[in-house]
Image (tube, grey):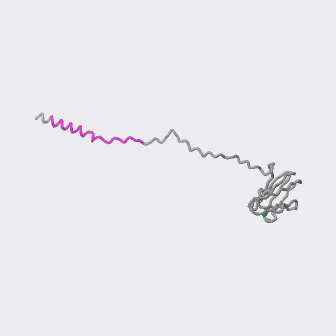
Amino acid sequence: MRRALMLLLTMFVLAGCTAAPSDKPPLPSVSTTPTTTSTSTPAPPSPPTTTTQPTAAPPTNASGPKVVTIQGSAFHPATLGVHVGDNVTWQNADGFGHTSTSDTNVWDTGKIASDEASTFTFTVAGTYPYYCSFHSFMKGTITVT
Ligand SMILES: [Cu+2]
């Protein structure tokens, strides 16, 4: 009788022991939230290396060849400053003829055909408006100092 009780007790304890793990409350899940403070900040992508040539656009009054390009039925630059004794060349980049004709009859290149050029030398200081005799809306000015 006593042995039986012991057995029962043992079985109870055993049962209790075996049951123990399942009775455990679920472990709090370890928070594996990634740390947002990342010390290694990725370097920003390097911008594409553009080899920018220094745009050395010569100023309008720079010394050297004084060229007015005729393009799109317009004089470029419309106003050009030169010095006394300078040559001014009108280069026609259009596919048809133009002229450079002084408003005050100082010069008239006559027809400058496509891809042709005409040059005039300014020997007297002054402001010289001019136009294209084919297209009266084309106007320019040469300023001689
Ligand atoms: Cu013209």
Magenta-drawn stretch contains 11: yes
| Rendering coords of residue 142 (x, y %) | 83, 56
- Please identify the quarter of the rendering in which residue 108 is found: bottom right
- Which residue occupies 49% across, 40% down? 38
Q: Residue furthest right?
A: 124
Rendered residue at 85%/58% (across/down): 128
Residue closest to the far left = 1
Task: Name the residue: 76% across, 49% down.
Answer: 58
The span shown in magenta is 6-32
* 81 w.r.t. 42: above or below: below
Give the mark count: 0
Q: Relative to 34, is 126 above or below?
A: below
125 or 31, which is in the foreground? 125
Residue 60: image x %, image y %?
A: 78, 52
Q: In this view, does 132 lie above or below 143?
A: below
Q: Quadrant of the N terminus?
A: top left
Residue 130 x %, y %? 83, 60
Q: In this view, does 14 lie to the left or right of 107?
A: left
Residue 25 located left or right of residue 94? left
Q: Magenta region, mostly helix, strand or loop?
A: helix
**Quadrant of res 19:** top left
The residue depicted at 12 percent of the width and 34 percent of the height is: 3
24 or 113, which lies in front? Answer: 113
Q: Where is residue 62 in the image (x, y as percent from the top left)?
A: 80, 49
9 drawn magenta: yes
